[in-house]
Amino acid sequence: MAARFVNIDRDTPMLMPPDMRDWVSDDHLVNFILDAVSLLDLSTAHVNHRGTGDAQYPPATMLALLIYSYATGTFSSRQIERSTHESVPVRYLCAGTHPDHDSICTFRVQNGELLAKNFHQVLELAARAKVLKVGNITLAADGTKIMANASKHSAVSHGHAVEQMRLLEEEIATLLQRAADADSAPLRDGLSIPVEIERRQDRLEKLKAAAAVMRERAKERHAQEQAEYLKKLQERSEKERPSGGKPRGKAPKPPQEGPRDSDQFNFTDPESRIMKAGSGQHFEQAYNAQAAVEVDSRLIIAGQVVDAPNDKQELQPTLGTLAPVIESVSQVLIDSGFYSEAAVKAVESSRSGALAGVEVLAATERHKHARRIADLEIKAEPAELSEDAPFIEQMRRRLQTRAGRQAYDQRKSTIEPVFGIIKEVMGFRRFSLRGLSKVNLEWKLVSLSYNLKRLFRMGTKLQSA
């Protein structure tokens, strides 16, 4: 008996137009995102009310297109435009229309306020669906390096910039002298002295502007380091012995004033920085993306992007972006990268808002991820400390108690998987936009897309107010 095959006919036209709803299943992510966007307030979307030019794409379509694209690993506006032709779910989402890459990029850049508002509204939907608790919650906070839309090879250090400016000034002076000498040797074909002078002067001006920015950054850094230095001097003087003896340990060194030779400036994205990445194994031109995650739902409820290479000063600013839907926070879990006495006390001293009465559990030193044998042993509760005990000892005791250990163990199983999903599953490892304000906008879009995808995976049934 001859084998039977399904007839594949690409030539015969369809007698009836297809129903686009047959292209994707009812339980597909694209349907969930379309339903979610239909529940959001889009009144603040940027719209051309003059009515000039071509007809505009509806804000709901553009927002759903961006969210679905980011949730499924497509971030470039040109790639998103291509997917409207090649991806069945995206063709369904756009109903057969094809927004061009310029319209997609413009909508993304002009609607930062809308994305921030919708981020909070999605969390309200999650709370209404009983997926997100809003009272007495525990947060895990951390930061991760996301590459900037710029190469580290487009950067220059302050020491190299100063040396290059000196060489360029010498070359310009030499070329001017050659132009003044009537009997100077001719240049190679295609080269002219005025053009060569102009090229070097342009480069010199760019280096001078870069050096000026690095000097301003150095002033800000020196002011912060000077405040820390004076604080250390005061603490040292308070530890002096009653007999007048010198305090133990080395005296703190005053901070260096002015830019350092290693200070960097990137010509492509000046607000990005060269930062350690990959557990400090290499350096990347990057931004530091912060997030705070609710431990039960694993939803991102706060976040920001900063240009600081470490997290020491970022605890309070990150928690300051907490979604308004959150009523109270009981604990915040952070690693040693966030820990400082000043940062913890600043958060715990909150007397109003969701952070009133919050307790911070922080590692005071780095530990390897591997479980040690000592961690398996049952330990007695640590002894009580006196009220005047050093703050770092009090923090260590918090983590040594049974309740503290159980609470802190949730940190690495909460925030780190979220960053892993964003980088590995969604594939978001590099910002498409440039500049601190724009990458903050894009991080909000990433967080919004992650939260909706998380709610979809949890089988959440969204409902309007």
Image: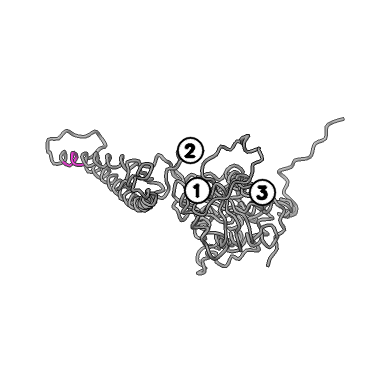
- Colouring mode (rainbow / by chain / secondary structure / one colour): one colour
Q: Nearer the viewer, mark 2 or mark 3?
A: 2
Q: CA distance from mark 2 to mark 3?
A: 41 Å
- Looking at the picture, how far across and down is residue 381, in whole percent? 63, 46
- Looking at the picture, how far across and down is residue 222, in whole percent? 34, 50
Residue 24 in sight from this viewpoint: yes
Element marked by disc 3: helix
Q: Residue at x 70, y 63 (%)?
A: 463
Within the magenta stretch, is there residue 175? yes
Pick whichever of labels 1 and 3 is earlier in the sequence.
Answer: 3
Q: Which residue is mark 2?
A: 280
Element marked by disc 1: helix
- Looking at the picture, how far across and down is residue 23, in whole percent? 71, 50
Tell me the kind of residue under disc 1. Ile
Rate crowding at label 2 as few (under 14), some (14 to 19) or many (20 or more) other CA atoms within 10 Å: few
The residue closer to the viewer here, 301 or 224, is 224
In this picture, residue 147 sits left or right of residue 416: left
Pick whichever of labels 2 and 3 is earlier in the sequence.
Answer: 3
Q: Which residues are magenta?
A: 172-176
In this picture, residue 309 sits left or right of residue 104: left
C-beta proximity under 8 Å, tags 2 and 1: no
The residue closer to the viewer here, 7 or 75, is 75
Within the magenta stretch, is there residue 197? no
The residue closer to the viewer here, 239 or 93, is 239
Q: Which residue is mark 1?
A: 392
Tell me the kind of residue under disc 2. Gly
Element marked by disc 2: loop
Residue 432 in sight from this viewpoint: no
- Looking at the picture, how far across and down is residue 197, in whole percent? 23, 43
Quarter of the picture holding the N terminus: top right
Give the label on residue 88, or none: 3
